[in-house]
Image: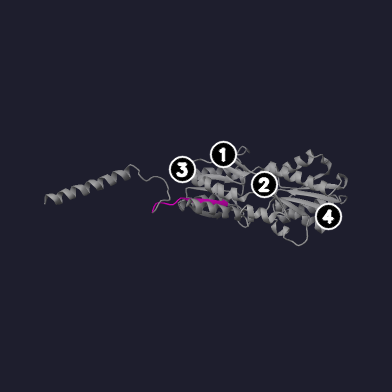
Amino acid sequence: MGKSIGWRVLLVGLSLLAGCNKQNGAQTGPTTGGGEDKIKIGFVVKQPEEPWFQLEWKFAQQAADKDGFELIKIAAPDGEKALGVIDNLAASGAQGFVICTPDVKLGPAIVAKAQSRDLKVLAVDDQFIGSDGKPMTDVPYLGISARKIGQSVGQALIDEMKKHNWSQEDTAVCVITFDELDTARERTEGAIEAIKAAGFPDTRIFKAPQKTSDVPGAFDAANILLTQHPEVKRWLICGMNDSAVLGAVRATEGRGFNADNVIGIGINGTDCIAEFEKPAKTGFYASALLQAKLHGYQTADMMYNWIKNGTQPAKDTRTIGVLIDRDNFRQVLKDQGIR
């Protein structure tokens, strides 16, 4: 009888000890250990059909596979859906999300909604704009160095013009613009800066504003410009991305121009691959390949470490591009893990 009572006392003591450990918070926060809650991270993009965003998702998944968290891929093509997905992520048990917002002016609303749901937020590609019209520098952001990439495109256009022995007198620059988006404006302004710095006359640099940020929008914008300047014999073309330049190149082709008198250089390096694979050269000469791996993998990894270890991401991280053309694109894409 005495031994039985002793064992009972010991078991009660162990139970009380276990209860104290739980009350003292021995297990706090989301972890990925066996049987414990798994970290969930959202990755929200505005145009899931675009190769760039598909690559971001691809590389973010690689980070999830390495770190052991669950990646939730969500499309938010408009402001209503961008705000709605925050509620959905919270309901699914996510602790944070990376987002390329469809509208940078939604920044304050996204941050407020995320805070109300106790979710961490990291902006990628397009930086949030505050109610004062200025970038929200208090929100962690990873994006491209837009102006520098634009400058590299502008310099590459000048370099190619010189290689082709084109004279400034019969050459003009078509800049497909979309100033509503700050990142787009920074890219095209950077290109114009570099072209001017190389001594190209300002009077032969023409802006063609897009109404829509796609190939048809660029095509229409370029067509208007070409109609206004039939005297131009050779064109240098740049814009905010590959689609802008592709649209302009298609417009020049409709006016009888070809690879002998058009040099177009895009930005992104993913929407132009089919162009490089065509048997015959076109006026789309090259593109500044953005580093989707960093934008997808690094942001997801940053968010994971923020949630897991409390390591807050840097407030401003910038990436640069790599110039690709018909000759080197296959090797560069392989090196970048895209193909």
Q: Which residue is mark 1?
A: 315
Which residue occupies 80% across, 40% down? 198
- How many other residues sit within 10 Å of disc 2, few (<14), some (14-19) or many (≥20)? many
Q: Earlier in the sequence, mark 1 or mark 3?
A: 3
Residue 151 position in % (x across, y down): 72, 42
Label 2–label 4 contact, CB within 8 A: no
Q: Earlier in the sequence, mark 4 or mark 3?
A: 4
Label 1: element kind: loop
The kind of residue on which mark 4 rests is: Asp
Label 1–label 2 contact, CB within 8 A: no
Q: CA distance from mark 2 to mark 4?
A: 26 Å
Furthest residue in direction bottom, as rendered: 279
Which residue occupies 73% across, 58% down? 276
Answer whether residue 71 is magenta in the image: no
Question: Nearest the camera: 133 or 189?
Answer: 189
Q: Which residue is mark 4?
A: 260
Q: Is residue 84 visible?
A: no
- How many other residues sit within 10 Å of disc 3, few (<14), some (14-19) or many (≥20)? few
Q: Which residue is mark 2?
A: 321
From which residue to which does the magenta span run?
35-44
Q: CA distance from mark 1 to mark 2?
A: 21 Å
